[in-house]
């Protein structure tokens, strides 16, 4: 994104104001009564995002000329926004054609099994795909129970966030890392942290749900036991299409066919946006071959993905300036980001309140700028630059894990909250959710840092 940054083309600190303003708008406008309803319109979101984006482009035009604006747009839109959105769009639409329906007994073991399955498949079909696939059957299973809020909260922790750290397709920050040259299978090295944190969360959830189950009324338990509908899966062909998306991400690099497993690569003649065209082809097959009733049963709409598209066009443009500054100032940040632990908390805290994808990019660029070109033990990226593996691990885990700290930390969080509320589950407020995440997740993050740091 910032290969064009030079000593004479380093934006000043004022240039980060549009980026900060946009992210604060995303965090605050939904919470203010006067703007809550207005913000629900994707057109209004797009207006805000493009407004801040135009301010950034105006800065570049005045400071460096029209040529710089074209370079910024090339990196922000063509190189990163389009691949990013095509991936999310493909996962969203294809997973929306898979309908898992049923009503099992809502025992603690049943609910824990749902979350465990979600933790595994989140890295394979993405946190967005896994959340779309599992949240509705989980809510249907628990429809007779009164105490369901904690189940949705842990679902957001595990399925919508922490479960997605094993593959680049699992969570948007990791996909951006892949776009910047991290080998596709490198994220599998995070399996220890993934397994440990998910295991502890599942145990905590099982104990919590066991206590909650005991507080259900006898009448509700009797109703739950009386209604048993086996799980059925419709739209199975979409599982193959999801696999196709995974293969596209793994084996096709932007601009050329590129087999990159970290230890072996193969290049073919350049074909611009080949990967994106293949993904959209799979989306087309999904729409053509999936019965319309399946998407209706899933209450599928394009609203959520259009929201992401509207906001991220502005985010990708606005974040060019802070990324250039951080890349050029990496050495000056060394005293403050001198250890993996500091990278973990810095990346994670910002990912909690802003958005974990652009936050990951900012700290990824910072860590790369702090890494000597020929340092021993460093991970060499596809583009030839290097980064310290410990720093990359900390940044990856911070962005993915702490995306679960708030509703705005990761895209699926608000989507799951919305679906749960439409199903009759009263979810906590923005700050109420933070009480749960702060009390449950932060101690686990500290413990994990002590064990794996």
Image (tube, rainbow, N blue to C red):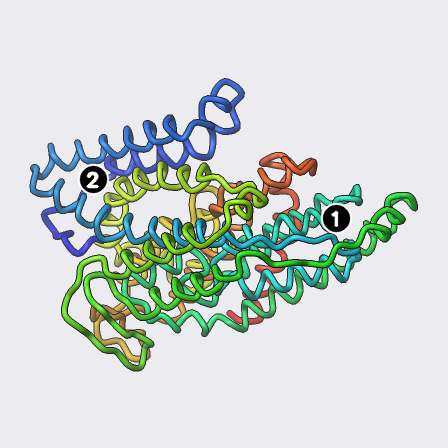
Say few, some or many: other residues with alpha carbon within 10 Å of mark 2 (under 14 / 14 to 19 / 20 or more). few
Residue at 36 percent across and 49 percent down: it is 358
Query: Residue 407 lies in what quarter of the image?
Result: top right
What is the x, y in percent for residue 291?
50, 50
| Left or right: residue 161 compared with residue 444 | left
**Is residue 200 positioned above or below 185 on the image?**
above
**Is residue 340 positioned above or below 82 on the image?**
below
Residue at 30 percent across and 68 percent down: it is 387
Q: Residue furthest top?
A: 34
Question: How far apart are labels 1 and 2 at the CA level?
Answer: 53 Å
Q: Residue furthest right?
A: 218
Give the numbered dot on residue 150: none
Between circles 1 and 2, the one closer to the viewer is 1
What is the x, y in percent for residue 142?
74, 48
Query: Residue 220 lies in what quarter of the image?
Result: top right
Disc 1 secondary structure class? loop
Residue at 70 percent across and 43 percent down: it is 149
Q: Nearer the viewer, residue 404 or 348?
A: 404
What is the x, y in percent for residue 448?
57, 65
What is the x, y in percent for residue 75?
20, 50
Q: Nearer the viewer, residue 349 or 130?
A: 130
Residue at 48 percent across and 57 percent down: it is 400
**Is residue 354 positioned above or below 39 on the image?**
below
Give the numbered dot on residue 142: 1
Instruction: From the image, tell me which residue sits under label 2.
Output: 12
C-beta proximity under 8 Å, tags 1 and 2: no
| Left or right: residue 19 compared with residue 60 | right
Specify which label sits upstream in the sequence, 1 or 2.
2
Disc 2 secondary structure class? loop
């Amino acid at each position: 994104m910032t290969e064009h940054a030079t000593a004479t083309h380093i934006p000043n600190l004022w240039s980060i104001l549009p980026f900060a303003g946009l992210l604060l708008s995303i965090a605050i406008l939904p919470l203010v009564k006067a703007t809550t309803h207005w913000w629900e319109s994707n057109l209004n979101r797009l207006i805000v995002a493009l407004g801040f984006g135009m301010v950034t482009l105006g800065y570049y035009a005045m400071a460096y000329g029209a040529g710089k604006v074209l370079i910024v747009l090339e990196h922000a839109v063509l190189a990163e926004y389009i691949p990013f959105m095509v991936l999310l769009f493909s996962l969203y639409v294809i997973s929306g054609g898979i309908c898992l329906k049923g009503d099992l007994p809502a025992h603690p073991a049943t609910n824990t099994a749902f979350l465990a399955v979600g933790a595994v498949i989140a890295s394979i079909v993405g946190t967005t795909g896994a959340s779309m696939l599992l949240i509705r059957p989980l809510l249907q299973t628990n429809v007779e129970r009164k105490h369901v809020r904690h189940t949705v909260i842990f679902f957001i922790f595990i399925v919508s966030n922490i479960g997605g750290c094993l593959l680049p397709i699992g969570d948007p920050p990791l996909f951006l890392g892949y776009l910047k040259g991290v080998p596709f299978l490198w994220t599998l090295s995070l399996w220890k942290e993934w397994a440990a944190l998910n295991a502890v969360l599942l145990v905590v959830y099982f104990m919590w749900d066991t206590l909650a189950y005991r507080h259900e009324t006898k009448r509700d338990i009797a109703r739950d036991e009386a209604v048993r509908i086996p799980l059925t899966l419709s739209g199975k062909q979409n599982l193959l299409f999801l696999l196709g998306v995974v293969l596209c991400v793994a084996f096709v690099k932007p601009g050329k066919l590129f087999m990159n497993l970290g230890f072996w690569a193969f290049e073919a003649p350049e074909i611009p946006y080949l990967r994106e065209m293949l993904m959209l082809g799979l989306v087309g097959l999904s729409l053509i071959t999936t019965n319309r009733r399946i998407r209706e049963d899933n209450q599928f709409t394009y609203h959520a993905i259009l929201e992401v598209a509207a906001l991220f066009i502005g985010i990708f443009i606005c974040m060019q300036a802070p990324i250039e500054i951080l890349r050029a100032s990496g050495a000056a940040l060394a005293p403050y980001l001198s250890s993996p632990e500091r990278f973990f908390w810095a990346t994670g805290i910002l990912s909690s309140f802003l958005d974990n994808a652009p936050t990951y990019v900012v700290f990824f660029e910072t860590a790369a700028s702090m890494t000597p070109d020929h340092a021993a033990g460093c991970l060499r990226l596809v583009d030839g630059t290097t980064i310290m593996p410990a720093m990359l691990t900390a940044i990856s885990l911070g962005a993915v894990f702490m995306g679960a700290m708030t509703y705005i930390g990761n895209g699926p969080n608000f989507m799951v909250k919305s679906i749960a509320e439409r199903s009759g589950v009263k979810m906590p407020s923005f700050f109420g959710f933070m009480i749960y995440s702060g009390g449950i997740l932060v101690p686990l993050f500290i413990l994990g840092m002590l064990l794996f740091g």
